[in-house]
Amino acid sequence: MGVEVGAQAARSRALAVLRIRSRALAVALLPAAVAVVLIAGGTSGHISGGHWGVTRWIVTGVAVVVLLCAAGVALVVARARPAVSPTVQIAEDSAPDLYRMVRDLADRLDVPAPSAIALTPDCDSWLEDRTHRAQSPPAAESGDDTDGIRSLAGTRHGRPPVAPVLVIGSPFLWWMRVGELRAVLAPVVAGTGPSAHPDIAAARRFVRGLDAAVAVTAEPTRGPLARTVLAGVGWVTRLLLRSCRGHAAEMERGVAAAAAERAQAVDYGVRIVAQEQVGLAYAGWDRLLTRVALPAWRMGRWPSRLDAGVVAALTELSRRDRLAEGFTSRLGERPACDLLEEPGLVDEAASLLAARLFHGGPAECGPDWAPVGWQEYPDEVVDRTWRTDAARLHRVLDAQGVHVATHPTTRDADAPTLSRVLDHLTVTAADTNAAPSAPGGGRPEKTGAAGPAADPADRTEPSDPTEAREHHDGEHQQLHHDGEDGHDGDDGHRGGDRGGLGNGDGDGDGDGDEGALGTERTATLAAGLSAELAREEAAAPVRGGGTEQTGPDRTLWDDGMLPLFPLQPPRSGREILADHVTAMICCAAMDTAGATPGLDWLDGPTLLINGERAADLTPRVLTLIEDGDPTPLRSWLHHSGIRPEKPVRLV
């Protein structure tokens, strides 16, 4: 009964959308109808004499203009390419078990099977209409079938499939078990039933066409004539879209209600348990991207097994967090990725797509954009990141003319030593009596030989870098670190004191406060680092393009739009300085104390001293740069056997 109620509500709303389309067509044809009546009346002699001749010509001219405008709007709406999510194509012969499971699920739900299956690097699943001619699969060609998407029901005479495409989040395949995935996909697959109704399909095509036309009119074009024409088309399409908005939203709610009601008959009990895994997978995926993948992308490396990394991260969580006990017992069951013939290749493709969407990397590999495995991650990413940041720190110190007293064992006052950084950031009695720096660590006046200008600091220091993250923090309460293994106070996402190392993703002490820097020269150093980073980013070659394989997913986005979903807001000057000082400390630990770079699945790059993770470093670094007090940090260095007076190796 609930299925019929939801479907009927969706159909009634679809008819309302189609009525709006019919009214728009009637308005466009009305002047032409009046002109036909006047011309017919004049020909028959019923409407003649007086001003009727002039009126006939005026109305006919208006009708011609209105018809031309309506034809132009209709042409733009028909030819506009609707937005489609970037996905990884999955051919049926590369995942026969997955297609068989989806087909069986559709049979149990008594709905049409999806036309194809695709993966997205996100923790979500949905149905997507790709019946537009610009998005339909090309005709079958000889060669490898993995280059295209095959329909579950097949195609005839090259016509595109009618049923929508099932898009599955790739982390689900690796973290969920087969039964859990089937239960989670049941409400999604059930949506193909209402979608097959002609009225609902026509209403969706009309709304998506209007939305695509609005996007076309908003694109920058050349020539005043084209801008004027597109401005008129945009006004009409926006008016129609506003008129359809409420009915389209209610139609989609009706479709979702009907699908959810129908799916209750299939694996309902398993679905309740599987929803817990959905939230856990989302939190683990987000943490893996921001803590582990983002530092690698910044270094020109993209992890080629991100989905496998989600399993490792969530398994590590279950080991640390007593609230996650019991999750590891699921790992003995068959994972959903076994439904793929070559899960490694699919994982690699999804990982590259994630790098493109979230960071804007190129479409193909190269010397500056190469895949990296988890075994090589510490050396290829962590070590290089730390040494690159340490080298940048000393370049800025050189440009600012910073010279410190040399240690008896150090010959050069400008040698890349940790002592040089510590002495420069330490607040002395003379600094205490001097004029205070700008409040909030703002831009100070340049003094002495300060080379890099401090102006770019205004662009890279938002007032509160955590405001944009508060929404996500509320969604990721599944990640709990209750003080085990040195993870006290971790909030499960991007903020919070990790009790360890910064990885360059904008994490600080978790309070979201910009904080005042210790002295004027500390603020000047932070501004210099911000300016140096801005210059390096401006000088970096533009990523994108390449010779990616052609197919239905190739033209779904523009390379100029990448990244579509940036992961992090710009880092503040304090965060940049803290990351660079931390990198310098890690370099000194590796070169003088035998420490090694490591990878923590939940916190990203980490420093290993005697095989143990170095904890409580971040608060000591913040004490140095904010208060100018090196005592806690020097005590930690002495306890760890790190010699700050020794030069370190830089990139």
Image: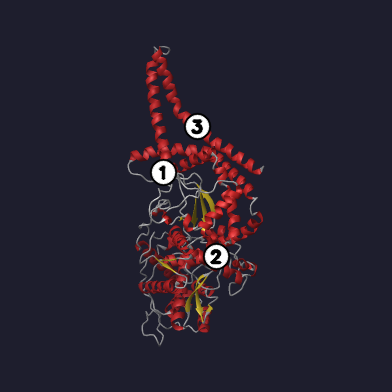
Dot 3 falls on a residue whose secondary structure is: helix
**Residue at horizontal 55%, vertical 70%?**
498
Q: Does 232 appear above or below 292?
A: above
Left or right: where 139 falls relative to 502: left
Determine which quarter of the picture holds residue 233.
top left
Residue holding disc 3: 22
Q: Quadrant of the N terminus?
A: top right
Determine which quarter of the picture holds residue 445.
bottom left
Left or right: where 545 falls relative to 212: left
Tag 2–tag 3 contact (CB < 8 Å): no
Dot 1 falls on a residue whose secondary structure is: helix
Dot 2 falls on a residue whose secondary structure is: loop
Q: Residues within 10 Å of mark 2 (few under 14, many from 20)?
A: many
* CA distance for labels 2 and 3: 52 Å
Q: Quadrant of the C terminus?
A: bottom left
Q: Does 366 appear above or below 130?
A: below
Q: Position of residue 65 (x, y in %)?
A: 38, 29
Mark 2 or 3, closer to the camera: 3
Residue holding disc 1: 216
- In the depicted view, which residue is nearer to us: 376 or 472? 376
Question: Amino acid under label 3?
Answer: Ser
Q: Residues within 10 Å of mark 1 (few under 14, many from 20)?
A: many
* Residue lying at the far left of the rendered structure: 223
Q: Earlier in the sequence, mark 3 or mark 1?
A: 3
- In the depicted view, which residue is nearer to us: 255 or 402? 255
Question: Amino acid under label 2?
Answer: Gly
Q: Does 252 appear above or below 531?
A: above
Q: Look at the image and tell me whether residue 587 can be seen.
A: yes
Residue holding disc 2: 495
Q: Position of residue 117 (x, y in %)?
A: 50, 53
**Residue at horizontal 45%, vertical 52%?**
149
**Residue at horizontal 63%, vertical 43%?**
3
